[in-house]
Image (cartoon, rainbow, N blue to C red):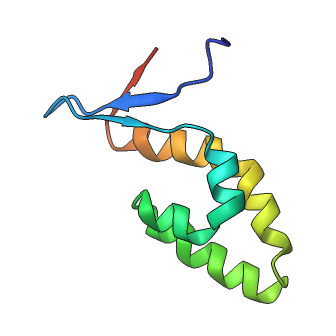
Amino acid sequence: MLTWVVNAFKNPTNGHTESVGPAWLWALLFGVFYFAYKGMWTHAIIGFALAFVTFGISWVIYAILAPGLVRKHYLQRGWVPVT
């Protein structure tokens, strides 16, 4: 396993662990609904608008960017990567 690939994050305040899994696959299958489920509302709204304008092509681009976006989302909120 590569060291920069993180599959889970732990909340330091309550110890809850959230698994990321294959974010690209979930974003490709469920699109903006995946980002809404993860609480990433800004990306869900932007992704919905872009999908409407680009006739769904942006859905694939968002799926490629999803692992980095989810990782950044958790790190900005203070979650600790679990290796």
Residue under the image location 68 percent in, 61 percent down: 29
Residue under the image location 39 percent in, 61 percent down: 39
Q: 6 and 75: which one is in front?
A: 6
Which residue ends up furthest to the left in the rendered image? Answer: 14
Q: Residue 82, percent across and down?
A: 40, 19
Residue under the image location 14 percent in, 33 percent down: 13
- The quadrant of the image that shows the N terminus is top right
Which residue ends up furthest to the front in the rendered image? Answer: 29
Q: Which of the 4 image quarters holds residue 11?
A: top left
User: Is residue 31 shown left or right of residue 12?
Assistant: right
Q: Residue 4, percent across and down?
A: 62, 19
User: Is residue 71 shown left or right of residue 79?
Assistant: right
Q: How many marks?
A: 0
Q: Which of the 4 image quarters holds residue 22?
A: top right
Q: Residue 57, percent across and down?
A: 86, 72
Q: Is residue 41 above or below residue 76?
A: below
User: Is residue 65 shown left or right of residue 10?
Assistant: right
Q: Is residue 81 above or below residue 53?
A: above
Q: Which of the 4 image quarters holds residue 16?
A: top left
User: Is residue 78 shown left or right of residue 76?
Assistant: left
Q: Is residue 10 above or below residue 36?
A: above
Q: Residue 40, percent across and down?
A: 46, 61
Residue under the image location 50 percent in, 70 percent down: 42
